[in-house]
Image: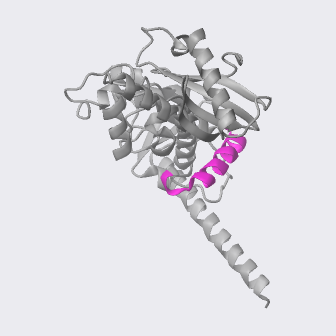
Amino acid sequence: MTQKETAQQKRQARMEAELARVQQMRDFELEAVRRAGGHGFICGIDEAGRGPLAGPVAAAAVILPEDLLLPYLNDSKKVTEKRREVLYQQIREKALAWAVVMVPPERIDEINILQATYEAMRTAVGQLSIRPDVLVNDAVTIPGMDILQVPVIKGDARCISIAAASILAKVTRDAYMKEMDEKYPVYGFAGHKGYGTKSHCQAILEYGPCPIHRRSFLGKILAGRPQTAHFSEHPTGRETGRMGEEEAVRFLQKKGVEILKRNFRGRDGEIDIIAREEGVLLFIEVKYRTSGRCGEPEEAVTPAKQHNICRTALYYLHSTGRGSQDPMRFDVISVTGAGIRWIRDAFPFIR
């Protein structure tokens, strides 16, 4: 037997073992439903995001075909992110019915996380295109449901339908938190998804909560500290500028923009960020506000300020041997409690 044939046999044996594991999950689920006197369409239900300090709680409801076996389907916490994405697409394509519902932070603060989770689960079941006959849940019984429920301890690792629901709920919520990372980059939501990591807690202490934080979860962290809409402290002008520039730089780098220089000073003033995007030289003024009470940040870039920025840009071009005919642009990045806006071509080149 060749080395290639041996490797192929090993892969086949691993796949057979994996399918047997998933079949065992299916058999366990069917037996649990049978013992409870259930039959018909089985709906798996699970949630994601009960514990984080920020973001919604998500709940998914899934009805799978009786003969469907998806290799590597498991509790979402036991599956890699890449594998979860593949399973997410497979479940959506092959399920008889599925739904995912997210309940926002303000509702969580209003009715508490447990009731918000139940609300998301009930709504998800209600949105299914097929009415289920049995609900298999991960260790909970959902109030207010007139359908037979079978709670299973550690059900997301033991029942195939609950595992499928756990994948849909987690991938949906994680995608949302990645979007929020673009809007509120200082907190690092893309990495920790809103959970209370050390870096996340430190960011909350430094900047205060943002609109997607759960205020009812932050009591111990923010004990004795003011809770404003975004940054909780009122720094000096110099500190404010630094904080805004740090956020702007992170934002630009995520967009693939190359940072060439920061705080470049000339005889007529200073340019906060000099960068390059697809061959175009960018001269960027960063304006920051802890609130909107003083108007939009870009409004502070007056004609006189624009003139000084342009003269400082000429000085930069001269000092670096670049020509003023090279492609260039003057942008403003607005940093506020609502997030970051990038105003391209904010004003023309004034010679």
Residue 86 part of the magenta segment: yes
Residue 288 placed where, x, y %? 47, 21
Residue 244 placed where, x, y %? 47, 28
Tally of numbered tags: 0
Q: Image quadrant for the C terminus? A: top right
User: From where the camera sits, is residue 269 visible?
Assistant: yes
209 relative to 268 in the view: left or right: left
Question: At 59% from the left edge and 60% from the top edge, which residue is drawn?
Answer: 22
- On screen, residue 347 above or below 46: above
Q: Image quadrant for the N terminus? A: bottom right
- On screen, residue 215 above or below 181: above
Question: At 69% from the left edge and 37% from the top edge, which residue is drawn?
Answer: 276
In the image shown, does 27 or 49 lie closer to the viewer? 49
Question: In the image as oriented, which residue stretches furthest toward the bottom?
Answer: 1
Question: At 59% from the left edge and 19% from the top edge, which residue is drawn?
Answer: 308
Q: What segment is highlighted magenta in the picture?
A: 77-98
